[in-house]
Amino acid sequence: MPELDQRVITGLLTTRLAHTKGRRLLLVHGKYAASGPEEFSVPVGDGVRRKVRVAHTTSVLGLTDAWQAHLATEGADLLVLTTDVPGERISLDLLGEMVRSKIITVDEADIVKQLFGAADLDPRIRRDPWLWLPGALIDAEPDAVQGGWPQRGTVLTLDAAMRALIGVRLGLDGVFEDGTPVDVDALLAWSRTPGGPERLAALPEAERQGITEWLAQSAGEAAPVLLRLALQGRGAEATALGVLASVMTEDTASADAAVALGSVFGLGSRPSELRAYARAVEGTLTRWIGEASGRGPQSEEARQRIVDVVHQADRLADNAHLTTALAGNPFLPSGFQARLRQLADALSEGPQAAQAAWERVAEHQLASVLYPKRVELARMAVRLRRWLDTPEPSVSSIGQAVRAHVADWGWADRALAQLWVGDAEAEPALAHAYRTLHDAARRRRAQLDEAFAAQLGPWIQHATATQPGDVLPIEDVMLKVAVPLAKRRPPLVLVLDGMSSAVAVQLGEELTGAGRWSELSGEEGRAAAVAMIPSVTAVSRATLLCGRPVSGGEGVEKEGFAAYWKKHKHTAVLFHKSEIPGPAGQLLDPRLVAAIASEDVVGVVLNTIDESLDHREQSSLADWPVSRVTYLAELLNSARGQGRPVVLVSDHGHVLDRTGTEVGPTAAEGVEAARWRTGPVLCEGEVALTGPRVLENGGRVTVPWSEEIRYTPRKAGYHGGAALAEVTVPVLALAPSAELAPAGWRELPRESVQPTWWEGEATSAPIPVPAKPNRAAQAKPKPRPQEGELFPDDAVEAPATAPPAEPAVFTLGQQIVGTTMYKHQRKFVRKAPEHKVVVAVIDALDHAGGTLSLAAVAAAAISSGGRTNTRPEGLVTVLTRLLNIEGYEVIGLIDSRTRVRLNRETLREQFELSEVSV
């Protein structure tokens, strides 16, 4: 006998009240729940409700007594009696009062149809194995305040019914409504909600099993695993356990690992289910990582979720002795450490092994969101390894050395500085590998500094401003760089006091990499000047700004700067540290803002880098983003807003103090500063310099070329000596647009500024394509003699045996333009570039590994000698029409439209390279 509660009675009445014909007694087969209310009201439409009284009786006499009592009750409306009395025993007088004159059998499916306002039900709801569903839907119906079940109006499908039920039962209201795909991602989120898994555990067995089976059908094999974990009270660690389940997807998974995993998940989980569960969890983590890559509270929340889950997964793996088996997992912190250990070994094997190992480190899913600095440090180590594998560099002249330092050795200095700071979380093996690499690179750098000092002594004795040799002296930086720029637009000259080549490398990469600034040059590469001696601010900065060798302070610099530009028919103004900040509410001084908006040449001295050398902050000294140089970003934005070019220049560089704490100052006479003094040379690592470019002590000083020598108490870094990092002055000419380039100047693509070893060598090579046979080279045999003829010696010849032709080697670009597909595609592209342009761009991208800056692509197109669009973006747009077939992205712009990416594999596939006509 079914137990009936208020919900069933209400649903039953809703379907039956229209057929009462004024009768007020309804007999229902079943037993009314003892906990149910005896009286309540039910809606009958148009806002009208009828009062109902419910009772249960087990005898004919009880039915009669209950009815008589109801009739005697004042204001009584409708009586519902639940009973198990057979219909044939009911008296005729009661039959006359009963709705439909018979005992009603409850049809829960009809009630569900009524509750959902559906015209009909999915037939499956009325059949096994879904017979439990109508009762569950009746029991789970939201109350009137919540609006009850959603009204369907048409057929209530099984999926719609299950989505509605799961929304209420599991607390997933609205998650799977309106056809939203049922995925494990939402279920994983539910498993972490307080009380969510407990709601499933509290359901009747049939309903719980039915929900689990439906989710398995809708969300895949992963759902049952998750639900079992939830029922075991392990919902909070379900996502972390999914990471462990990936051991089943590894090709090298051992039987021991499978057994260990089984002990974690318990009985009932098939290998296919665990693999599906692992894939589902990895998909969820991948989405979180994408969210964490942005900015704002949501990104930080996603990042914290990732941290919590992956560290929990590592703890669970350790407890289950699965850490070794999961060493290749791309989501576990322990897996990231394992890849770093592989890198430590590879650094001693060679550049190619190191590059491959670093790529595995960078491919780890947590690399970008949790370990970006550790990944970048590992990349610097690999770069330094490649540099050490290049031919031994040499110094042939002062000019050659400073140019090589800006173009090559200074990049090694940048990697060295970061490696010197190191990785605070590195395991001993990795720390040792980094230290070994650092020490080897420093030895090479010390050799270059020594060789440079040997050349510096003889050169400085005779070098003058008018006869500097093959050198750009610092006093000519304005003449060679700033004055040509001023012919197009007055520049903003930013003097970053103490900026070394290593710092310039980082600032240049950031500024040009964002696509907001183009680097210009009238030479082959970035300009490099030589500081005055000693390489200190009072000498070199004044000389730079005044355009002549001079020593002095701010007053000398201001007057000299204005006088220099007056000779070049420009008014100019120079701002120092105290003149940059504005009043309350304004970041920059209004006079500085007005000057940048005028037609004057404007100079600004920024002291952040030089001042940082007074502080012992190792980690900050190796990292110089634009944001760290006070006011630099704001000044650059102001210049860009006014369409001004910018000269980013130093007055001298600096060296860092990498000596141990036990190393004190070098005892010497005539100490004037940390890195220069008067008096004779006393120790190895020093050099005496005499000549017209020495502006202290009557033209004679002693300075160290070794970074390890200082004459004063310890600071974070120093300048004034003769090391390359101190004497070399990097000069960057930047413009908001390459159109501001003076006559004879050009834009420097990012790839042309950085040394070849910085990003490694190309891994792709042209594919050999068999050439067509040379028909002319094939010997035609002579006719055979007729019967009876003599056989002269030359009557029958063997075919000529020419050596087999070497297969022709065609580049990727040549192969593409030779395909029928390309020729067909070209017909539909208006003003398509010449073949040679397309070939040059494809080959340049192929050689660079698939990605180049817009400037580099433009340079490749121009160098081809073919006709092309004048704008790089326009060229790429045309190439997308040529190469992106059927919506597949073969080529396109990335990184805020500043770089071009070529998908080489998709290119080969789309153009069917086996079909090549030569």
Image (spheres, helix red, strand yellow):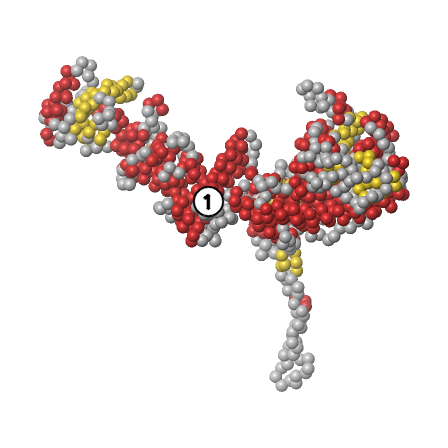
* Residue 352 seen from this side: no
Identify which amino acid the numbered label 1 is placed on: Ala
| Residue 7 relative to residue 914: left or right | left
Q: Secondary structure at mark 1?
A: helix
Q: Nearer the viewer, residue 77 or 214?
A: 214
Seen as rendered, the residue at the extreme top is 74
- Residue 736 in which image quadrant: top right
Q: Which residue position holds label 1? A: 317
Instruction: Please provide percent x and percent y for residue 204.
Output: 29, 35
What residue appears at the point 66 percent right and 60 percent down from the top-left corner?
Answer: 808
Where residue 622 appears, as percent x and y from the top left, is 68, 38
Going 57% across and 47% down the picture, which residue do you hit? 340
- At horizontal 59% and vertical 46% (from top left) the residue drawn is 428
Residue found at x 53% / y 32%: 300
**Quarter that holds the C terminus:** bottom right
Q: How many marks?
A: 1
Quadrant assignment for the N terminus:
top left
- Residue 711 to residue 429: above or below: above
Which residue is nearer to you in this view: 705 or 93?
A: 705
Q: Label 1 neighbourhood size at 10 Å, few (<14), some (14-19), many (20+)?
A: many
Relative to 821, does residue 798 appear above or below in the rendering? below
Foreground residue, 651 or 312? 312
Q: Is residue 661 left or right of residue 279?
A: right
Is residue 339 visible to the viewer in this orientation of the structure?
Answer: yes
Residue 781 horizontal/vertical position (percent): 65, 74
Q: Could you say which quadrant of the image residue 167 lies in? A: top left
Using residue 567 as the reference point, say whether residue 414 is left or right of it: left
Q: Quadrant of residue 3?
A: top left
Using the image, determine if residue 9 lies above or below residue 800.
Answer: above
